Each structure stands twice: as structure tokens, then as C-alpha cells.
Image (tube, rainbow, N blue to C red):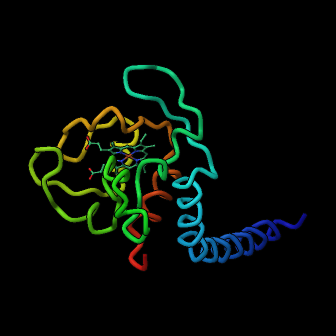
Amino acid sequence: MPARARPRWSIWAAAAAAAAAALAADASAADSREAGRRLFEGQTPLAAQISGQGLALPPQASRCTNCHAEATDARASEPNRAFAPVLSPDGLRRSQPRRGGPPSRYDVASMCRVLRTGIDPASVIVDRNMPRYELTDADCNALWVYLTEATR
Ligand code: HEC
């Protein structure tokens, strides 16, 4: 192979990789939203347990829609949905007192933390009825995009 062939190949490869990354970035917001919807509705199961019990919850029990309605959801006004807070973009992002703690708001990192550990942005521990989840950063991000997406 001539000495200059490798650098030229590398430049094309780098350009192709950059183009692919740009396309992926376009697609990734929509992909995350769809991935988040599937996680929220339980089509993609998440590993979870009830705090302190150490027992894995079956996927049918751990899906978010079992307990949480979304603001756009007609079920949000059903009395049995008052069991868990309605999750809306504004309710998550707006600074407000939660569970008697000082005002706090969620971002992606604090939502990951509450899902994994049950500790909210004001460091208050949520009720144990809210399961503790084992989820990846990508799962968290997808749920965050889905729940806070401005067009919803
Ligand atoms: C078995 C019922 C149940 C399931 C399933 C459940 N939650 Fe919860 N969740 C709760 C309850 C109850 C609370 C309120 C806890 C409190 O106020 O102490 C809560 C609180 C939360 C909060 C905190 C809201 C706030 O304003 O501070 C977030 C965020 C949340 N849940 C997201 C989720 C997501 C995302 C899923 C699915 C991955 C999920 N929950 C699954 C019952 C549930």
C-alpha cells in the first residue's frame, strides 16, 4: 500500500463518520422520545424493586403507567390516579415544594437519581410505593425526553 493511501482513507472515513453522527443526532431526539414512551408504558421492561424488600418487581408491576398518569392523559383526573403524582413537563421542571421539602425542580440527573435511589432534588426520600429502578443513563435520558418534551 502506498504511504499516502492510509491518510487519504482516514480522511474519508472521518468525514463519513461525521456525516453519520450528524444524521444520528437528528434522529436521536425522536428515537429517545419513542424509547422513553416504551419504557414509560412498559413495552420495554425495567428492572425495579420496592425499597427495602430486595425483591424484583415483575415488569407488569414496575411500569410507570400503572401508577402515574401524564398531564395529557384523560386518566389524570381519575381518583385512583391520585395515588402517584401526575407527571407533566411543567410539574417536573418548575421549582416547587415537594413532600414538605424546600422548592426544587428536576433535570435529567435528578430524575435519574430519584428513579434509582428514591432521593428527590431536595434530598427528600420519596414514598416507598415509588419503586427503585435499575436503569441505564440512556433509559433515564429517554424517559426525561419523553416526559418533558415541549410539544407534549
Ligand atoms: C407502584 C407505583 C409506581 C410506579 C410503578 C412508578 N411510580 Fe413514580 N411515584 C409513585 C409514587 C407513589 C410517588 C410519590 C412519592 C412521594 O411523593 O413520596 C412517585 C413519584 C415519582 C416521581 C417524583 C415526582 C415529584 O414531583 O417529585 C417521579 C419523577 C416518578 N415517580 C417517576 C416515575 C417513573 C419515570 C416511573 C417508571 C419508570 C415510575 N415513577 C413508576 C409511584 C409509582
- x 53%, y 59%: residue: 36
How far across and down, in percent of the image, does residue 124 sit?
Answer: 19, 38
How far across and down, in percent of the image, does residue 77 sit?
Answer: 34, 64
How far across and down, in percent of the image, does residue 101 sit?
Answer: 11, 44
- x 39%, y 42%: residue: 115
Residue 33 higher or lower than 62, as above or below: below
Query: Residue 110 versus residue 13: which sits nearer the camera?
Result: 110
Query: Residue 113 versus residue 6: which sits nearer the camera?
Result: 113
Quarter of the rendering containing residue 41: bottom right
- x 17%, y 54%: residue: 104
Residue 34 higher or lower than 150, as above or below: above
Quarter of the rendering containing residue 58: top right
Name of the residue lying farthest toward the right: 1
Q: Is residue 99 left or right of residue 58?
A: left
Name of the residue lying farthest toward the front: 79
Residue 40 higher or lower than 71, as above or below: above
Q: How many marks?
A: 0
Placement of the C terminus among the 4 image quadrants: bottom left
Residue 133 higher or lower than 103, as above or below: above
Quarter of the rendering containing residue 1: bottom right
Q: Is residue 109 left or right of residue 24?
A: left
- x 46%, y 51%: residue: 140
How far across and down, in percent of the image, does residue 147 sit?
Answer: 42, 63
Q: Is residue 2 left or right of residue 151?
A: right
